[in-house]
């Protein structure tokens, strides 16, 4: 049997054609026309006025935090169960990440825990939609309204997803996406910031480009970064965006097939198919080992690897990160749901190139490993 990788992108649309255009015209830097095209088309797709393409989804969060002037003394509330990029952006800005636990069924932040964490120093809520289902946005937006907080929406896993029929990436003050190859659409490396606020858009454009000034180019009033996306990357993005609906349907099919094949397997919790406000788009297909299984995700993943099935562990909680503990953050904190997800959860091959046979193979092997 051939190994089944955890992810493989589909690049069989107009990707090659647009890349050749870049080379034929000589437009390969961030000044090329695909960058603007991707920004406009992606922003329109998620119902936003402005799109600012950047070099990855992590720096998109850095720019979003900086653009909102979040800095020393400020607090930002976010889920503990997320990728390091979210908390890193807050910490690098000099602000304090304040975390909440997860919902055991959707794996998203438990929004009912947010209000108790709000203090006079709280400046923003950073929402992160995890693995396929969006966060309950109405509750977050109500709290943000009541306490005058910004909302940063990390929609890196949510291309094409909606919350109550409104696109993810259209909520709050500013939203970010990643185009890493395991996301629904990819540019190899890349990301985008979207917003409706012209001042925030202008700040992100400036921060992305070293805060060069239009008139006095090499005189800087502020420190930015080089976060520019190249025309080569954007060419891929434009081609991928053409197929977003198809890709979302395909991921949905992959998720449904896994669920059909694994539904009566004892010992595992599967992703929730839908909530009142959205259907799962299965960015990845997660598995959580139930208490009755006498080993952790690490063991299950090792056994699957021996049988040539690629997996990835779930996120490791922010409050348990050595780097943050060394900084004195999150002392004495405990978030039992997220801690369990981190230890008992992993995901199986979920890429767009996955075939029916491979899905059956993964499901069969998983059942074997659990016995
Ligand atoms: C992938 C991801 C990111 C980071 O994106 P990169 O492009 O890999 O830097 C940020 N947030 C979430 C929720 C992600 O899934």
Image (cartoon, grey):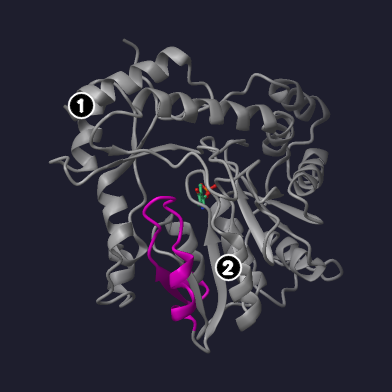
Membership of 113 in magenta stretch: yes
In-front residue for pair 298/251: 251
Residue furthest right as drawn: 215
Disc 2 is placed on an element classified as: helix
Q: Residue furthest bottom?
A: 120
Q: Tell me the quarter of the image containing the N terminus.
A: top left
Quarter of the view holding residue 227: bottom right
Residue depicted at 31% across the width and 59% down the height: 337
Label 2 Cα neighbours within 10 Å, binned few <14 / some 14-19 / many ≥20: many
- Disc 1 designates what residue? 369
Q: Residue at x 46, y 55 (%)?
A: 108
Residue 125 in percent (x, y) is at 55, 71
Of pointers 1 and 2, the one earlier in the residue sequence: 2
Q: CA distance from mark 1 to mark 2?
A: 40 Å
- Residue that mark 2 sits on: 140
Q: Is residue 277 above or below residue 17?
A: below
Q: Is residue 16 above or below residue 95?
A: above
The foreground one among 82 and 100 is 100
Does the beta carbon of the residue at mark 2 sit less than 8 Å from ligand 1?
Answer: no
Residue, x 76% and y 42% (percent of image)? 38
Magenta-span inclusion, residue 169: no
Name the secondary structure under disc 1: helix
Estimate the x, y position of residue 250 in percent, counting from the top left: 58, 26
Q: Is residue 216 toward the left or the right of residue 280 in the image?
A: right
Quarter of the C terminus within the rendering? top left
User: Number of labelled discs?
Assistant: 2
Residue 360 or residue 354, whichever sits in front: 360
Magenta span of residues: 91-118
């Amino acid at each position: 049997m051939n190994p089944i990788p955890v992810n493989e992108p589909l690049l069989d649309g107009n990707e090659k054609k647009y890349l050749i255009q870049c080379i034929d015209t000589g437009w390969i830097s961030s000044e090329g026309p695909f960058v603007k095209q991707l920004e406009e088309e992606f922003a329109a797709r998620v119902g936003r006025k402005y799109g600012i393409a950047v070099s990855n989804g992590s720096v998109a969060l850095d720019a979003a935090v900086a653009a909102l002037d979040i800095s020393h003394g400020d607090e930002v509330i976010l889920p503990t169960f997320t990728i390091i990029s979210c908390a890193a952006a807050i910490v690098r800005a000099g602000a304090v990440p304040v975390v909440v636990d997860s919902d055991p069924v959707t794996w998203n932040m438990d929004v009912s825990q947010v209000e108790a964490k709000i203090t006079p120093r709280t400046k923003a809520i950073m929402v992160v939609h995890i693995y396929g289902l969006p966060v309950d946005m109405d509750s977050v937006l109500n709290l943000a309204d009541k306490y005058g907080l910004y909302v940063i929406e990390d929609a890196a896993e949510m291309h094409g997803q909606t919350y109550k029929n409104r696109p993810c990436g259209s909520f709050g003050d500013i939203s970010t996406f990643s185009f890493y190859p395991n996301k629904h659409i990819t540019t190899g490396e890349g990301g985008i910031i979207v917003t409706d606020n012209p001042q925030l858009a202008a700040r992100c454009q400036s921060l992305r480009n070293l805060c060069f000034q239009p008139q006095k180019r090499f005189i800087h009033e502020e420190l930015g970064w080089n976060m520019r996306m190249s025309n080569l990357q954007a060419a891929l993005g434009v081609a991928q965006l053409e197929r977003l609906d198809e890709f979302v349907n395909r991921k949905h099919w992959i998720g449904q097939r896994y669920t059909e094949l694994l539904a009566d397997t004892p010992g595992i919790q599967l992703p929730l198919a839908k909530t009142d406000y959205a259907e799962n788009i299965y960015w990845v297909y997660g598995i959580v080992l139930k208490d009755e299984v006498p080993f952790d995700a690490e063991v299950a993943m090792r056994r699957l690897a021996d049988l040539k099935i690629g997996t990835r562990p779930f996120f490791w909680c922010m409050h348990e990160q050595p780097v943050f503990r060394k900084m004195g953050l999150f002392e004495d904190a405990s978030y039992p749901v997220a801690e369990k997800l981190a230890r008992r959860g992993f995901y199986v091959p979920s890429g767009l190139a996955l075939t029916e046979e491979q899905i059956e193979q993964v499901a069969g092997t998983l059942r074997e490993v659990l016995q």
